Amino acid sequence: MTTTQPPLKNISVKRQRTSSKSRTHALAQHFGFDGLINSNNERSLMERNIHSQQLQQQHEQYNIETIFKLTYDQCNNETTTEPDPDWLVRFINMAKQVYSPSMQKLWAQILKKELIYPGSTSLRALTILISMTHKEALLFQRVMSVSCQVNNNKDRKVITSIKTTEKIIYFGTKSKSYPIEYHQYALPYSSIIILMDLGLILKTELESSKINHTQNIQLHFKTISYTLSCHNKNTSLTYYRISPTGQELASLIDHNTNTKYQDYLLSRLIQVFTITTSN
């Protein structure tokens, strides 16, 4: 009978410091790949292969059981419908590979949401999610914390600059740009590139149409909205837009607005707009 190994999360959560040899040995043993490290190993290569496969199956079984248990604990007897069988099979096959406790909670939330609102999470979103590391998920969470919505458009944006063109008597026009230095808030451009490569942010920086200076625009953060009245008719915003798949994941990955960034953004916008708090 194969001895059940402790779940991988018990190794990663403790994060004790130890020597590289000890760490490598522990990981190899955990997955059943320590046959050549242990000189006194009497198992044949075939026996070791069977053993490692059994361990992998145990890890996967533990992962999916954990996710179903977390889903069960989150449920409050809401009305559900039968999930799409193809979606469910793909979900299970991917969820087996989720070892991080925080990511397991996220996958449990996805399953519950799908049971209550069928079709709420696409297989494409799941495919991207399973390819994300915990660090990449945190990066996406950080991007969402500096994102906002403009007017009634549900697409979330990360504003990168404000552009204005002013008429100057006898000299034509003068263009001016007010860059939004979001990288000050633990978001270097390399983080944006990573999320672009994952398909969570569109790869092109976009520019809005000229803002009608006779009409107000609404800027919506997670818990507060602002009304912006433009001083200049030739004003536009540049921004990165969260992709449709990113929008799906944004509804699943919890995030709070970065209030320091919000204050900073308002301090830049107020150079071009009159700003009031909306109800």
Image (tube, rainbow, N blue to C red):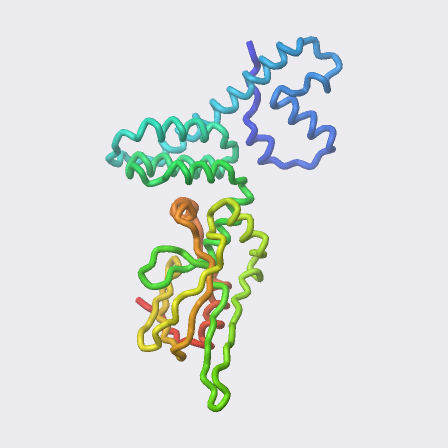
Residue at 53 percent across and 62 percent down: it is 182
Q: Quadrant of residue 68?
A: top left
Residue 26 position within the rendered picture, expressed as x and y whole percent measured from the top left: 66, 26
Furthest-bottom residue in this view: 170
Q: Is 212 placed left or right of 271 in the picture?
A: left
Residue 105 position within the rendered picture, expressed as x and y whole percent measured from the top left: 44, 37
Q: Is 235 placed left or right of 27 in the picture?
A: left
Residue 165 position within the rendered picture, expressed as x and y whole percent measured from the top left: 46, 78
Does 5 sit above or below residue 275? Answer: above
Q: What is the quadrant of the C terminus in the image? A: bottom left
Q: Nearer the viewer, residue 259 or 45?
A: 45
Q: Quadrant of residue 154?
A: bottom left
Residue at 40 percent across and 33 percent down: it is 70
Residue 14 position within the rendered picture, expressed as x and y whole percent measured from the top left: 60, 35
Does 90 sit above or below residue 263? Answer: above
Does 234 sit above or below residue 109? Answer: below
Please give the count of numbered marks on the rendered protein: 0
Q: Nearer the viewer, residue 162 or 104?
A: 162
Residue at 39 percent across and 48 percent down: it is 244
Q: What is the quadrant of the N terminus in the image? A: top right
Residue at 48 percent across and 50 percent down: it is 141
Q: Nearer the viewer, residue 5 or 153?
A: 153
